[in-house]
Each structure stands twice: as structure tokens, then as C-alpha cells.
Image (spheres, helix red, strand yellow):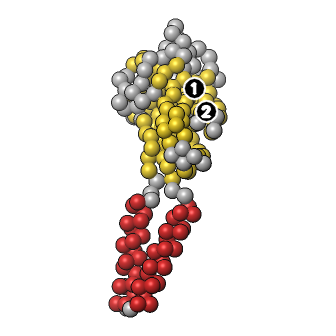
Amino acid sequence: MKTRFHVLLPFVVGMAAFSSQVSASVVFFDDFTGDAGGTVTSLTNWTVAGGNVDVLVGSCSGSTCIDLEGTPGVAVNSTITTSLDLVAGNYSFEFNYGNNSGGPNNTLTYDFGGGLVSGTIDTDSLSFTTLDTFTGSFTLASAFTGFDISFTSGGPADNSGSVLNSVTLTQVPEPSTLALLALGFLGIGARRRRIH
């Protein structure tokens, strides 16, 4: 019994150390808590185009979110964009979205990497107290300088647009790399067993 424990102990310790090193790493996160409340034309981590946005502090299920339509009179259906430099690899993304006051005919258009992953979501059935979560993934074969992430609200100019909260981009280790490293640890464990 002791022999098996001594053989497995290095494997378990190695896997624990390995898993902490290859876990998914957050590349970008913004929940807009660093932005002042009210109608603004700039955000801490984003550029605002097409007008302004409303920072709704504590209004979205108790957290801060952005109403991408802003206030009429300046412009409507604003776009927010952030730009990142990414290395090659697998990525997952997630964001929470809803609709300010349940205004009709509102949409949220998202774009990751200039059309690499993009789409439009109908937000009519949601409110800013009932947010939904959207997730997706993509793979970059090579490094990407100036990888843009953008969100645009669509709909009527009625001061109630699509809302956005908690944008996260995570780099995910490749499953094949994980499998090879796990096999390596098993091989080390087996070799130690033969020696003893």
C-alpha cells in the first residue's frame, strides 16, 4: 500500500502544479464599475462612437451596465470598441446583455476581431433587471495585433437601448496539450514505479 502511495504522490502533486499553470487565463474583463454613472461620451476601457452611452450604476441586477443607446439629441445606437493584442490560441468570450426598460425593437450587435465572430441578438424580451448571458469561442492561428471587440445597439431613438455588462475574454489551453502533459506525468509515475 505504501509503494502505491509513493508512486502516486508525485503524479498527484505534478498534476496539481500542472493544472494551475495551464488553466484558462482572463485576457480582458470589464464590468464597467470603473466608469462614472450618467450619460458619457467615453469609457475607461472602450472608445464610444456615434454619440453617447448611459452608465447605469447598480441598475442591472444590482451591478453596473451600459445602455448603448445613450440619450437622444446627441446620437443614438452608439458603438463601443476596445482593441487588444492577442497571441495565437483558443479563446472563449462571454457577456451579459439585456434591454433598458423593455423598449421595443432593440438589438445588440457584437463583433470580435473585425467579423471573425459576430452576430445580432434580439433583446426585446429582456430588461435591465433580467440579463441573459451570451458565450462563444474562436481560435487564432497566429498573433493578432489590434483585435477589436465592439458592441452596437440597434433600434428606435427612444432613449432605451440594449444594455451590456461583464464582458470577458479568456484564453483557453488546447485540449491536446493538456492530454500530452497528462500522459507525460503518467509516464513519470510509471517509471518511478519500475525503479522502486
Q: Earlier in the sequence, mark 1 or mark 2?
A: 2
In the drawing, does residue 85 fall left or right of residue 3?
right
Which numbered tag is attached to residue 152?
A: 1
The amino acid on which the numbered mark 2 sits, given as a three-letter code, is Gly
For numbered disc 1, what is the local secondary structure?
strand
Answer left or right for 43 relative to 140: left
Q: From the viewer's side, name the closer residue of 72 and 30.
A: 30
Q: Quadrant of the N terminus?
A: bottom left
Comparing 145 with 36, the one in front is 145
**From what the image shows, is residue 2 above or below residue 110?**
below
Q: Residues within 10 Å of mark 1 (few under 14, many from 20)?
A: many
Residue 43 x %, y %: 42, 24
Instruction: Examine the rendered structure and indicate whether residue 98 appears above or below residue 159.
Output: below
Front one among 160 and 25: 25
Q: Residue at x 37, y 66 (%)?
A: 17
Residue at 61% over, 23% down: 154
Q: Find the distance from the CA under tag 1 to the CA under tag 2.
A: 13 Å
The residue to which callout 2 is attached is 114
As drawn, is 18 to the left or to the right of 119? left
